[in-house]
Image (tube, grey):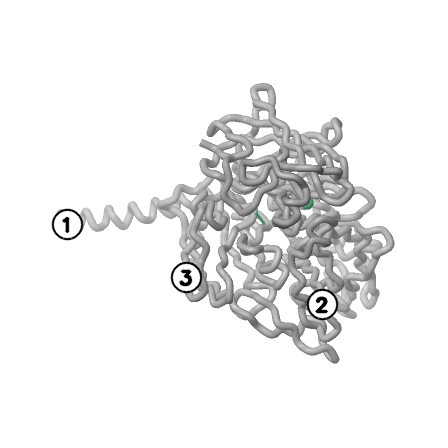
Amino acid sequence: MASQNSSILTRRDVLLGSAGLAAAALCRTPVSASEARLHEISLTCDRALVAMVGSPHPDTEVWCYNGAQPGPEIRVRQGDRLRVRVENRLPQETTVHWHGIRLPNAMDGVPHLTQKPISPGETYTYEFICPDAGTFWYHPHQRSFEQVGRGLYGALIVEEPEAPDVDRDVTWVLSDWRLLKNAAISDDFGNMHDVSHNGRVGNTVTVNGRVRDTFAVRAGERIRLRLINAANARIFGLEFAEHEPTVIALDGQPVEPHTPEGGRVVLGPAMRADIVLDMKASSGKRFTVADRFYRGLHYRLLDLLYSEAEPSSRVGERSPVRLAANPLAEPDLGAAERHQVVMGGGMMGGMRSAMMDGRETDIRTLMHNGLVWAINGIAAKGHAHEPLLSFARGRSYVVELVNDTAWHHPMHLHGHSFRVISRNGTPTPRREWQDTVLLEPRERTEIAFVADNPGDWMFHCHILEHQAGGMMGVFRVS
Ligand code: C2O
Ligand code: CU
């Protein structure tokens, strides 16, 4: 009798446990580790042939996950625990970094800093909870200028407990490739010209792994479009013809819904934007989505093609989409400690020397080592370094990022999201949360955050050739 009672109690405890989980999900507080649902997947890194450009061009050999380029879109719900078994069948060591996820340092996928790289033939298992809903992605951090350039990455979507009211939730992974005439990937990775200028900007842009002509839409529908810039170096500036995009999230974090300046969505490498597009035109029409970021290099990405189907009856009936905030700690600007980080070097940067391996080194010797960029005068060779900055856990920081170069730099911090609070001395109107902030040439910006995630975290330019060329460092939180 007693044992029966205790088993009933146990069952009731389990039920109460799951009700508690549902309630926690609704108010979007972080779910504790023991309550999280487990989501298990495997990723195999290997070569594959894909129809990237399409006939009459031959297939392209890429490096990718599970034979697909981009790799599988991983979808979990906010608060879920993700366990990923990674098998490396590449001819090189690799790691997987979960870009933008605020996870424990040991799961961050940085070679020699947070883990030993995964050797060819070996497997490694990552496991972590996804605390924030939003659009994220995964990619290697080992020789990423080559491995990402060959196609190793995929989307990681963390769904809100309550999905916003849209008809379709669509991801566009934007890639940029440098292809030869036979559609093979040019293997001039990491050449000094790319490293010292604007990185490996290619000649072929794909959406979800293929050169596209059209994207089919239906009159009256509302689409949530998750844009991910997975390119090594290309910056996108997308315009949607007569359609006005409403940006609802940046780098996975909700933002005050707004129309971007000039209706153009600008995304540096690694950055994401969630936009809402209302298909307000009529059946059968066609509109060009164009990338107008680089002057003189405008091109048509694809056309939005309205089907002949009847418009959906919901046209014009809907209120704007607004996402609930993620559980991020709010920096206390009054009490924040301030630091400055200066990015220098590159072509026309006038850098004469920098610290390399702890020694002041002249530019010729730096270049022999493939280095042309520096942060606070230090050119980083490899990932493991003495920290550039050390932060006290739980404390608020304002870091001024100064771009003292003639080039754009999308600067990324691991393990945290930060608010972008000013640009060139002017407060930003939306104080957006980002994990990667795009700095224009000579621009300065202030970011603010609570250093609440302990560990050694990479801070680097996400133009992968700049990163390899020295523009990276470590921020320590302890
Ligand atoms: Cu998306 Cu350090 O990387
Ligand atoms: Cu850069």
Disc 3 is placed on an element classified as strand
Q: Amino acid at mark 1?
A: Ser
Q: Position of residue 430 (x, y in %)?
A: 70, 34
Q: Position of residue 123 (x, y in %)?
A: 41, 61
Instruction: Give the numbered dot on residue 3.
Output: 1
Horizontal side of 88 relative to 356 (left or right) equals: left
Name the one closer to the observer, 84 or 424.
Answer: 424
Q: Residue at x 72, y 75 (%)?
A: 182
For label 1, being within 8 Å of ligand 1 is answered no
Which residue sits furthest bottom? 56
Viewer-nearest of discs 2 and 1: 2
Which residue is disc 3 drawn over?
Answer: 123
Q: Position of residue 320 (x, y in %)?
A: 70, 45
Q: Residue at x 38, y 44 (%)?
A: 33
In the rendered image, which quarter contains the C terminus? Answer: top left
Give the vertical position of 103 relative to 178 (above or below): above
Give the vertical position of 322 relative to 339 (above or below): below
Marks 2 and 3 in Cβ contact (< 8 Å): no
Instruction: Give the numbered dot on residue 174.
Output: none
Name which of mark 2 and mark 1 comes first in the sequence: 1
